[in-house]
Image (cartoon, rainbow, N blue to C red):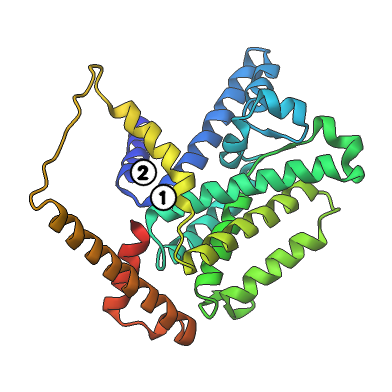
Amino acid sequence: MVRLFKDYCLRYLSGGIVNKFIFANVALYILLLFIGVFSTLFNVGTFADHILSFLELPASLPQLLFRPWTLFTYMFVHAGVWHLLWNMIALFLFGKIFLEFFSARQFAGVYILGGLAGALFYVIAYNLFPYFSPVLAYSRMVGASAAVFAIVVATAVRSPEYRINLLLIGSVRLSTLALVTVAISFIMLTGDNAGGNFAHLGGAFAGWLFAYMLGKGTDIISLVVRPFESFASFLKRPGSKRKAKFTYVKGGRNADYEYNARKKADEAEVDRILEKIKKGGYASLSEEEKKRLFEASSK
């Protein structure tokens, strides 16, 4: 058992960004499962429910006010093994496709952005529409589906002609699949999983917004990822105060001029590539242009 756990951790450490997010979801599910089992064995079953209540997203604004971290934690928690399984299968399949066009950093950012947008849509809907008033006080939401929707829609916007093979259906364009799943979520807004479907729409909107803004030359993911990167950097700092480092650049104003000139030339090249995508699609790019666009989107 210990060896199996070590092997799983090693796979996580050596795997890509998609594997890391799947690991986080699965590990948290198993941890909560163990807590539930031991809570029942020691006749403190409410302890497991208490822990879960600190992770799942409440629809009630007063409750959310005292548990704001649930806007983030809920997207890594699942209600059951099938809920977890289907979300992780979708995350694995579409995450790999996403990485054909975007960077690992953007994957993490879109996952988080989609989850946050899904939470926002869910909370607003349950507090805005009278239909949900009877269940508002005790409604909770968990799951990564909003984040997965963001991944799917962002990829579909970037490469709408990309085709995938579905069991019993055959080859389908990714854009068609995205539109159908979003339409189904809209139709089911008053169904048993109304909160989840509102979250799906929020995640889909986040994915579309990311891809649209990136096409305009703005990567909004930096706004999402930067706080987490800053926090991680803070944790890595040694206990003692670090001395400020100053770098002397030889060349003065001439060096600044050359730097600005190079930067302007790089931006012009990226604009040219984006314009080419609009006219002929992503497939019209050469390997060098694809590489150049990937490097620019990673900055």
**Residue 22 shows in this picture:** no
The one of 55 and 233 positioned closer to us in this rendering? 233
Q: Residue at x 43, y 55 (%)?
A: 106
Which residue, as the protein is rendered here, is positioned at the far left?
Answer: 250
The quadrant in which the C terminus is found is bottom left
Residue 6, compared with residue 102, is above or below; it is above
Quadrant where the image shows the N terminus: top left
Residue type, numbered disc 2: Tyr
| Callout 2 secondary element | helix
Which residue occupies the foreground of this view, 191 or 227? 227
Residue 181 appears in which quarter of the rendering? Answer: bottom right
Look at mark 2 in the image and give the residue it sits on.
12
For the residue carrying disc 2, how many other residues have a C-alpha within 10 Å: few (<14), some (14-19), or many (20+)?
some
Specify the label residue 19 is tagged with. 1
Q: Position of residue 271 (x, y in %)?
A: 39, 74
Q: Are marks 1 and 2 in contact (CB under 8 Å)?
A: yes
Task: Tell which of 68 and 269 is nearer to you.
Answer: 269
Q: CA distance from mark 1 to mark 2?
A: 6 Å
What percent of the width, then of the height, locates residue 148? 57, 55
Left or right: 120 as drawn, with respect to 13:
right
User: Residue 187, relative to residue 73: is it above or below?
Assistant: below
